[in-house]
């Protein structure tokens, strides 16, 4: 089912001072954006993935946006290029030597383009003359020299003449820009990543540092901004090892004043006033109730009730403010490791037939799909065992079960566990393990095989609909598409999406892990395999949790967005499936926080979206107040 968290790591010192860091890597605490910044409209931070050109921004209202701008390897920065008070993206493309500036925080082409400096020059954005408009200057590391230019460049003519040029700093130190004394003019500073030394000048003249102090740990990446809205810029550090931004509200040595868990290890920090982030609603979590290790949530069609499955084998019904028990099979269910009650599907005609299909691991550790019936609001009674599957190990059980738009019942099974698919089940259509099954539970005893199943005529197990899955942890259907979250081995988590009507897809495990060769580790062939539409690396993430496309009525701005998350980090993202690819990828953790032991998502009969935490709480995602 789910991976256990890694053993706790010892705390690390955030700032080199007498008191310890605010956070340990093993127990990162989510906090919202700096409160002072929200009240006084100061700067906020963002991160850019240089490998993909995707920008992730947070504004003072707590809104988040994600968009693509630029090419892999471009150097990102931000500034107010059109003097409207909003900072927007800039790029330096070292392959052609040009700077590309955009005047809105959206995907699109450059509004301004000009040639920039020499190979190896570092772009610096700021208001260097106090006129309210940002320009692009440069730092030439080979000379340790800053060139300050107070006008934007023009096409092939490039940058204008430098209005100031001076030597400052030591080789290898990383430059940054800020208004460190609050006089309205940006000046330059340098950060020595090996030691955490920060030093800066308050004027564009050659000389020694006006101020210096030690901040952070080796490898931290620094960006400066006005985090409190008082007109003075101070540092923030992005720590790759913790994927966390730490904010300091003064230019002094000390501990972090605020922090945000955000991003991935190889992302680069940017800062500014980002303005309204168009089309991104603000969200929050509304707790519905607390349960005993809940693993699944679903609802009958046209019925306001919620059905919540608990890991030990109890299914609760939430009806308004009342919680009752409809099924208790604790005596049949094993819960060690990744076992337990793993799936629940209610028949499309549940309101008249009361049929419930429950997926669990039995006391022998094997997977069971059983039918129960709940009539007239009473407790459910056993009807039949639909199918049982032997499990060689205690992990990778999969277990999710759902009815498809075709009326058939789908059951996801992992590869049997053991690490690395030792029995090669993922690529073997002769076993049910590592597959998505498709059963007709309205015909046959105990089920019938749909005639269009890919192996209905032979060549594999007739129950199989798709193969090549490692541990499918939640799948769902929407608008003719099937989405599957498949837990990775050690490196990549993935979301697969394909037409729900397409039979016989091979999702690649264990030839591939995500888009990457697994066995063999190099030189594998992806011929005949379906690659994921989205992947992300492990690290503080560890186990993907597939979700649902939102179609509810409370948040129309989210229609068509597929939501998913990660069990270990508790992060929640969404994307829009377009052209067979994940687009408009957005992380919602800045608004929703980190959900501990995120085990599942769910939908009610109205299409509203729920988040399930194995730690006990069930939440509904709602518009922020």
Image: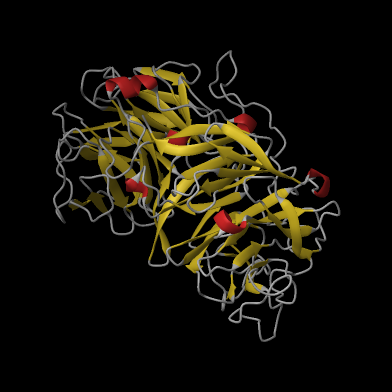
Image coordinates of residue 461 in percent, x first then y, are: 71, 77
Q: Position of residue 75 (x, y in %)?
A: 35, 48
Report the label total. 0
| Residue at the image position 57 percent from the left and 21 percent from the top | 21
Q: Residue furthest top?
A: 18
Residue 580 locus on image (x, y percent) = 42, 67
Q: Is residue 215 left or right of residue 346?
A: left
Against 182, is 434 above or below?
A: below
Give left or right: position of 543 versus 182: right
Q: Quadrant of the C terminus?
A: top left
Q: Is residue 13 above or below residue 361?
A: above
Quick one: 455 or 513, which is closer to the camera? 455
Q: Quadrant of residue 357?
A: bottom right
> What residue lies at 42% left-to-right and 32% top-to-bottom?
222
Task: Examine the rendered structure and indicate whether residue 313 appears above or below residue 24.
Answer: below
Q: How is the image coloured?
A: secondary structure
- The answer to which quarter of the image holds residue 233 is top left
Q: Nearer the viewer, residue 25 or 561?
A: 561
Q: Nearer the viewer, residue 579 or 377?
A: 377
Residue 200 appears left or right of 526: left
Across and down, in percent, residue 66 comes to 36, 47
Residue lying farthest to the front in this orientation? 376
Q: Residue at x 55, y 54 (%)?
A: 351
């Amino acid at each position: 089912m789910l991976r256990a968290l890694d053993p706790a790591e010892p705390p690390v010192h955030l700032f080199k001072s007498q008191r310890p860091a605010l956070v340990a890597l093993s127990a990162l605490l989510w906090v919202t954006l700096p409160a002072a910044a929200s009240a006084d409209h100061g700067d906020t931070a963002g991160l850019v993935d240089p490998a993909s050109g995707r920008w992730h921004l947070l504004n003072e209202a707590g809104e988040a946006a994600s968009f693509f701008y630029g090419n892999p390897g471009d150097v990102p920065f931000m500034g107010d290029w059109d003097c409207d008070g909003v900072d927007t993206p800039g790029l330096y493309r070292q392959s052609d030597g040009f700077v590309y500036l955009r005047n809105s925080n959206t995907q699109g082409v450059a509004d301004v383009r000009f040639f920039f400096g020499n190979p190896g020059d570092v772009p610096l954005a700021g208001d260097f003359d106090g006129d309210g408009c940002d320009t692009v200057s440069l730092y030439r590391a080979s000379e340790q020299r800053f060139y300050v230019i107070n006008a934007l460049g023009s096409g092939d003519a490039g940058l204008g003449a430098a209005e100031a040029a001076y030597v400052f700093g030591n080789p290898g130190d990383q430059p940054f820009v800020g208004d460190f004394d609050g006089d309205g003019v940006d000046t330059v500073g340098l950060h020595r990543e090996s030691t955490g030394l920060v030093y800066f000048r308050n004027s564009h003249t050659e000389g020694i540092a006006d101020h210096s102090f030690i901040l952070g740990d080796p490898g931290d990446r620094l960006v400066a901004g006005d985090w409190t809205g008082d007109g003075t810029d101070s540092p923030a550090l992005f720590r790759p090892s913790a994927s966390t931004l730490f904010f300091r509200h003064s230019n002094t040595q000390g501990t972090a004043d605020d922090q945000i868990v955000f991003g991935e290890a190889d992302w680069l920090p940017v800062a500014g006033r980002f303005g309204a982030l168009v089309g991104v609603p603000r969200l929050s979590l509304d707790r519905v109730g607390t349960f005993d290790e809940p693993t699944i949530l679903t609802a009958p069609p046209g019925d306001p009730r919620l059905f919540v499955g608990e890991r030990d084998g109890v299914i609760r019904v939430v009806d308004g403010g009342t919680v009752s028990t409809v099924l208790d099979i604790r005596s049949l269910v094993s819960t060690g490791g990744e076992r337990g009650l793993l799936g629940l599907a209610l028949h499309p005609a549940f309101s008249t037939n009361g049929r419930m299909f429950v997926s669990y691991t039995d006391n022998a550790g094997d997977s069971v799909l059983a039918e129960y019936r709940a009539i007239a609001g009473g407790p459910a009674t056993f009807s039949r065992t639909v199918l049982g599957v032997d499990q060689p190990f205690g992990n990778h059980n999969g277990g999710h079960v759902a009815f498809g738009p075709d009326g058939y019942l789908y059951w996801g099974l992992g590869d049997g566990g053991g690490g690395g698919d030792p029995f090669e089940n993922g690529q073997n259509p002769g076993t049910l393990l590592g597959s998505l099954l498709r059963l007709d539970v309205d015909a046959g005893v105990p089920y019938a095989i749909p005639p269009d199943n890919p192996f209905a005529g032979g060549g594999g197990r007739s129950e199989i609909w798709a193969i090549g899955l490692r541990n499918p942890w939640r799948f769902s259907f929407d608008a003719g598409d099937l989405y599957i979250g498949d837990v990775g081995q050690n490196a990549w988590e993935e979301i697969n999406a394909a037409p729900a009507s397409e039979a016989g897809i091979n999702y690649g495990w264990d030839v591939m892990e995500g888009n990457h060769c697994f066995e063999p580790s190099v030189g594998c062939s992806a011929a005949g395999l379906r690659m994921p539409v989205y992947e992300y690396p492990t690290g503080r993430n560890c186990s993907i949790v597939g979700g649902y496309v939102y179609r509810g009525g409370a948040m129309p701005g989210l229609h068509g967005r597929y939501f998913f998350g990660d069990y270990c980090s508790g992060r929640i993202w969404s994307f829009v499936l377009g052209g067979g690819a994940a687009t408009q990828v957005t992380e919602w953790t800045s608004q929703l926080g980190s959900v501990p032991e995120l085990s599942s998502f769910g939908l009610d009969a109205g299409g509203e979206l729920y988040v399930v935490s194995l730690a006990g709480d069930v939440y509904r995602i709602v518009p922020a107040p």
